[in-house]
Image: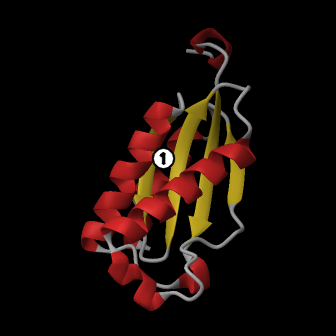
Amino acid sequence: MLRAQRGATDQYHIVWCVKYRRKVLIDDIEKTLKELLIEISNENNIKIIEMETDLDHIHILIECSPQHFIPNILKIFKGISARKLFLKHPEIKNKLWNGHLWNPSYFVATVSENTEEQIKRYIQTQKER
């Protein structure tokens, strides 16, 4: 099906890292993070198509309307997830300084229907790399 026929949505591959590349996205912390991001995306009319973490970063493939402003999406994802992760897993703070979970930078690339499957596979294999 052509993208134009699916409706007015865009897809983005987004990556962001833990501050200082600390390896904190493990076990229950990783599980909580994924649950939080799904909750945040549902509340903001954003569809997570694919998501996977490695120890110090996360990859997400999202679909949203063109009206969504990507920097705002990142601000919401990073801000809410950091606050709630610190509350639920205070032990994270022992590995970080100044109370910041996420590095302020991020990577974003638009995804076309020609590259969608390739990006999905790349995200799915993060733990294997």
> Which residue, as the protein is rendered here, is positioned at the far top?
5
- The tally of labels here is 1
The foreground one among 83 and 56 is 83
In the displayed structure, would residue 127 be above or below residue 36? below
Residue 92, given in percent of the width and then of the height, sits at 40, 80
Rendering quarter of residue 86: bottom left
The residue drawn where x is 69% and y is 63% is: 106
Residue 96, given in percent of the width and then of the height, sits at 51, 87
Say which quadrant the C terminus sits in.
Answer: bottom left
Q: SS for tag 1?
A: helix
Q: Amino acid at mark 1?
A: Lys
The residue drawn where x is 70% and y is 32% is: 68
Residue that mark 1 sits on: 120
75 sits left or right of 35 in the view: right
The foreground one among 89 and 35 is 89
> Which residue, as the protein is rendered here, is positioned at the far front?
87
Q: Residues within 10 Å of mark 1 (few under 14, many from 20)?
A: some
The residue drawn where x is 49% and y is 64% is: 82
Residue 53, given in percent of the width and then of the height, sits at 42, 64
Say which quadrant the N terminus sits in.
Answer: top right
Residue 31, given in percent of the width and then of the height, sits at 29, 60
